[in-house]
Image (cartoon, coloured by chain):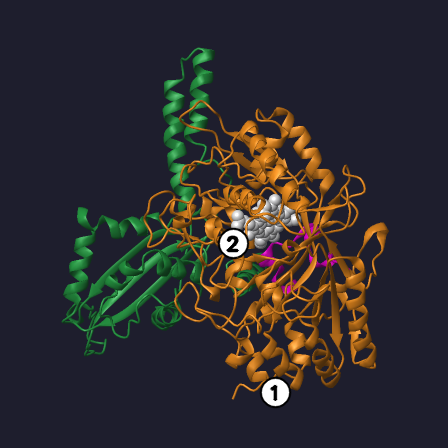
Chain colours: A orange, B green
Amino acid sequence: MSIDLQDIQGNIVKGYAQYDYPKARYVFYHIRNEVAGRAFVKGIAPLVTTGIPWNKKAKPNAADAPPPATTNIAFTYMGLKMLGVPRKSLQTFPEEFVMGMKLRKDILGDDGPSDPRHWDRIWRDTSVHLWISINGRDPASIETRYQEISHLVAESDGGIIQLSGHHGPDGSTDLPYQSASLIYKNGIPQAREHFGYRDGIGEPYFMASSGHPNRVIGGGKPTRGDPATRKGWEPLETGEFILGHRDEAFETPIAPQPPLLAFNGTFMVYRKLHENVGSFNRYLDTVGENYPGGKELLAAKFSGRWRSSGAPVTRFPTNATAETFEFQLNEAEARLYAERENPSKEAKEAYVALRTQMAAFDYNHDLEGSRCPLGAHIRRINPRGALEHGKEAFNTPGALTNRRRILRRGLPYGEVADDSRDDGDHGIIFIAINASISRQFEFVQQQWINYGNDFKLANDKDPLTGNHGVDSNQQPTGRMILQGNSTATENPFFCAGIPRFVETRGGDYFFIPSLTALHMLSNGTVDPT
Amino acid sequence: MSNIAGKAYAMNVVTPAKWYWVWVNKLFFWFVQLPGGAAYLKGLLTLSLIHYARWAIVSPKEFPHLDESQPKEKLKYSYMFFFSNFNGSWDQYVDSFHAAIPQGLDLFWFKNVKYPKSVPLQPFHAYITYNQIWTSHYYSAYPLATSNDIKSARHLTRELRAFSESSARADPLEFHEAYQRLLRDVQQDISIMERTPIVSLSAQAVEQRLDQADAERADQ
Ligand code: HEM
C-alpha cells in the first residue's frame, strides 16, 4: 500500500541522525491568542520537512534535496485548544494525550527524583502548547532556521511566546531551548549515549519504511521463519505508527475526528531523561569485579547489547566473539566514512551485512536467558516473540509484542564533565512516535520497564532505565538476575542494590499533524460535523 | 464495586446464543479437552497472565427459580457465562486474547448473538464491554502475587523441600554442588514480589478513597 510521504512530517519516517543530521534544537512555545497562533502555524508550514525520500545528488533547492536544517512541529492538547479546534473534535483525542505527561506520573513511574516537582522549570510552571524541532548538519544551519522562526514569533506581537526554563550545564535553569547532539569523538559524531552504549540500532520496520530491505530483519514482526533471514520477518502495518492506515488489528486505528485531521498524523512522546553516569560507572566497577564475566559483559547483560559494538549478547555471548565482530564493524564503518561522498558498492554491502547481523536474532535459542538475560533492556522492550516462551502457541509469535513497538527519534543532550559524578545536565532526549501513546509507549514504560510479570520476573525492573527505589535506610533496591546455563554448570549471578540510573527531567505528549491537517489548523477549518 | 483486587482482575461476560446453536459450542468445549484439541488450549495456557478462565452454557430451563416470589421469566436464549481472573488491565487481557488465539475465541463464541469475531479489535472490544457484568465483590488473599508468581512459588517450595531433605547429611562439597544445582533449577522463580503497578488512574483513585475511609473508621 502506498502512502503519501509528502503529506507526512519527515521525523516520523526518518531518524535524522542517520541522515547526517547530528544536532538538534527543540523549542517550545505558548500561544496567547488564537489568531496569532494560527498565523504562526501558517508561517511555519512552508518550512516543515516532509517524508519524501531525499536524493543526495539533487540540486540544493530541489524538493528532494536534503535541506541544511529540518523543521517539524507538534502540539499538545492545550495547544490544539488554543488554536480553536472545536470541542467536538477535542473530545475525540485520547485520554492520555488530553491529560499530558505530568498527570500520568503514577503510570509512568515518575516518582522520587523523577517526580514532576523536580523537572526542568519549563515543564513545571508553564503551559507548553507547541513544539518545534530543528535538526541540522551544523550549528550554523540550525541557528539560521531558528532565526527565521524567531522572526515569526516577533511578528506575532506577543501572541506567541517562546518558553524558556530548560536546565543546562553550569547550573543554568532558564535556557531558551533544549539542545541535543550526537556525542563527538575526535571530531566524528558517534551513535552513542552517555553510559557508553552504542545506540540507534533497533528500529521498527513498517510498510512505509524506507531504506535497505534488509532492515525488515529484526525490525519487522517475527514470522516463524529463520530470524537470520528476511523470511523470518514481515513489515509491521503502517497504522502502528501513522493514523489513518491499517494497523496490526486489521483496522484503522482509533483516531481524532474529523478523519482528515488525524490522517497521516501521529502521536509523539518527548521526555528529558537524565543519566546518572557516576552511579552507573561505580556500579559496573564494583559489581563487575565480582562478576565472572567482568565489567563489560555485565554492561552487555544490562542492555542486551555490547557497549562498544552494539553486538547482541544473545548472538555474541563471549568477549572474544564480540571483539571479532567489533573489529569487522569498525573496519566497515571506517571505510564507509572514508568513502562518504561516493561510497562504493562493496563498502556499502560489507556494512549492511554486519549491520544485519546486529538485528538478525530472536531469543528462541536462549529461552532461559543464559546469554541475554530475561530482564535486559532490549529483551524487555522488544521481546521479538519471546513471550511465547518457545511454545509456538499463538496465532503469530509476535502476538503480544507487535502492538507495543515504538519509533525512537531522540538524541543525547549535554556533556559529561566528570564521569564519576551524577550531577550536571546530560542524558537522552527520548522521543517516541506511535499511533497510541497508551498502548505503545505507556504500556512499555509501565509494564516492561518498571515491572516484570510478562517475563515471569515478578516486580523486577529494567536494570538500566527502571525507576529503582530505596529501602528505609536509603539503600537502592534495584536487582536483576543474570540467568545461568542450567545444562552447563554456569550459575545465575545476582545483581543487587542497583540504584536509579535514569531520572525523568520533563516532557509531554504531542500530536504531529500531517501537512494537510497543519493547513486546516492554521486556517481554522477543522470541522468534525 | 471493583473488578480489581491486588494484581488480579475479575471479568464476567454473559452472552446470549440461540438455543439451537449451542450444541456447536458444547461440542467445541468437549473437543478442546481431548488430545486433538490441545492446540487450542496451548495458546490459552501460554498466556501467562491468566489465573483462570471458564465458559459455561446455561439453557433457559436451567436458570434457577428460587421460590414463588421470583417472577417467572420467559427466556428466549441460552446464555454463555464466561468468567476469568487475570493479571493486568482489561485492555491487556482482551488484546492478548484477540492477538494470540483469535480462532479459538471465534469457536468459543460461535454464533453468539451479535458476536463480531475477535478480529478486528474495536468491534470485539465493544462486544465485550456491552456484555460485561461488573464484579460486586472481589477478594484476593495474595494481593502481591500474579499467576506466574504462584507457579514459581510452588516450584520453589518443591525444589527447596527436596533439597533440604537430600542435602541434610551431605558433606560440604556435595552440599555446595547441590546448592549450585538448586540455584540453576530455580533461577526463574526467585524474583521479588511487590505492589502491583496501577491498573488505571480511576482504579487508583477508588482505592485511595477506600483506604482513606478505612483510616477514618479506624480513627473513630
Ligand atoms: C536514558 C535512558 C535509556 C538508555 C540509556 C537506553 C539505552 C538503550 C540501548 C543501549 C539500546 C540498544 C541499542 C539500540 O538498539 O539502539 C536501546 C534500545 C532500545 N530502547 Fe532504550 N534506553 C533508554 C530509554 C528507553 C526508554 C524510556 C524506552 C521506551 C519506553 C526505550 C526503548 C528502546 C527501544 C524500543 C529499543 C530498541 C529495541 C529493539 O528494537 O531491539 N529506551 N536503548
Position in image of residue A235 (x %, y %): 44, 58
Q: Can residue A465 be seen from the camera position used here?
A: no
Q: Can residue B114 be seen from the camera position used here?
A: yes
Horizontal relation, residue B45 to residue A5: left or right: left
Tell me the kind of residue under disc 1.
Thr
Position in image of residue B88 (x %, y %): 45, 55
Horizontal relation, residue B54 to residue A368: left or right: left
Quadrant housing the N terminus of chain A: bottom left
Q: Which residues are magenta?
A: A102-120
Instruction: Specify whether residue A119 is painted magenta.
Output: yes
Position in image of residue A526 (x %, y %): 59, 85
Tell me the kind of residue under disc 2.
His
Position in image of residue A428 (x %, y %): 68, 52
Query: Which residue is the site of mark 1?
Result: A525
Mark 2 residue crowding within 10 angstroms, few (<14) / some (14–19) / many (20+): few
Q: Are marks 1 and 2 on the same chain?
A: yes
Magenta region's main secondary structure? helix
